[in-house]
Amino acid sequence: MFEKIRIIFTIPELRQKILLTLGLLAIYRVGWQVPLPIVDPAAMRAFAEESGGISDLLKTVAVFSASQLSQATIFGLGIMPYISASIIFQLLGTVWPPLEKLQKEGESGRKKINEYTRYATVGICLLQSWAYVAFLSNTRIGEASLIQPSFLVDGSLPFSWQLVAVLTMTAGTVFLMWLGEQIDEFGIGNGISLLIMAGILAAMPSALVSLAGDTSWELGGGGGKMGIETILVLAALFVGVVAGVVFMTQGQRRIPTQSAKHVRGRRVYGGTRQYLPLRVNQAGVMPIIFASSLLLFPQMFFQYVSSAYPGNTVLAALHDSFTRGQSYLYNICYIALIYFFCYFWTAITFNPKEMADNLKNFGSFIPGYRPGKRTADYLERVMERITYVGAGFLALVAVIPTIVSGALGIPAQIASFYGGTGLLIAVSVAFDLVQKIDSHLVMRNYSGLLEKS
């Protein structure tokens, strides 16, 4: 393995791509530490400790922003607006004919859709950053404001400074989008995905420090701290969960296909048996993202209403019922939505009729099924069955942090690394990066990173 890593850095083109990618990621992390000029960092830290994580809205944004929104930085929105815009246009492409036509125009259509996506990203940034700045300016810790006193006029933040903060955060997200495009063009790997992965992994050191502080390093623990046996269980569980995610992410159902035989003179061509791979987790991480985002609305609504009517026990109970990880109702709704969005997203991204037509056009067929409609029906039936398994896997990964936190009594910040969106993204991006490095090595007659020496 070390010899293969050495070989990677002896290839000038590959070395340049890797170093450029690392440099752009370093710029991303440096910019992440730059706070908004209007914010009082000490007040923000105090509020984050007092509220246990700012708010559910900011926690959801933090999935794509390294969980650092408590610092209110210029990259506070991360690249979630760009992801949201991309998802919107991908969904619209299936129901809006003009956009569907653009998707079929090849490279020129893709460039046009990317242009529309950028415009939509700016619009989403303006809305989200305005809501975020309004949240900062209206929040108090006792009598103290989260805004620096020098920016306040009669106890409130003037419109001009609100606009500056909004434009600063919007520019930060646009800059991240540009960084991702530079990695795509001149670096290695998918730029946006690498930025997401860097943000997720950046939260690990603080989580490990927190874990070490809550451990007594003795059997049985003591003083309200975890024992060393709990740490060993956590380590073994983490390895098992990562192995399971890798296995299911790479899992395929291989359907045997056979090409038709062609006789030319005395020679027979074709007739070879191949496989059509269908991914078990066809929907990827999208169902978890959609389910989490949808469940955010009742959380925000009941949180607002219950705070407006603090004496109402019914509203307080409803708020507790839709608080992440604190009720069976939330987890049941979470799992149900993951199943729904798994089938929904698979129906959008998987077209059995088109796949059957492609097999027919290339002179291939699935043994036992006539080309055309019967093949398409068979592919759809198989995909429905394996999607059920994939949805169950996603649901399990999504609720593992809740189970780990409740069973072992560890903080949610640490439990979040045992499942959920972050782990799936990290594994998927790591595999994609390794495969792209492999392609460079194989092209130059070297063995890949995952091949045995």
Image (cartoon, rainbow, N blue to C red):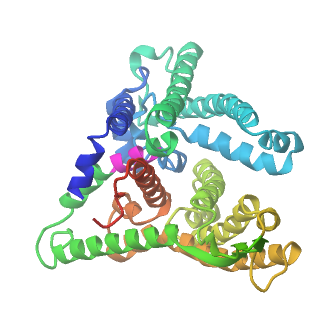
- Residue 275 picture location, percent across and down: 63, 74
Which of the two residues, 382 or 51, is positioned nearer the viewer here?
382
Quarter occupied by the C terminus: bottom left
Question: Which region of the structure is painted magenta?
Answer: 196-203
- Residue 428 picture location, percent across and down: 48, 57
Q: Quadrant of residue 80?
A: top right
In this rendering, the answer to whether 334 lies above or below 308 is below
Q: Report whether 111 appears left or right of 299.
A: right
Q: Residue at x 57, y 13 (%)?
A: 160
Report the magenta stretch's main SS: helix
Quarter occupied by the N terminus: bottom left
Q: Is residue 199 magenta?
A: yes
Q: Quadrant of residue 110?
A: top right
Can residue 150 be seen from the camera position used here?
yes
- Residue 133 picture location, percent across and down: 54, 29
Q: Is residue 29 magenta?
A: no
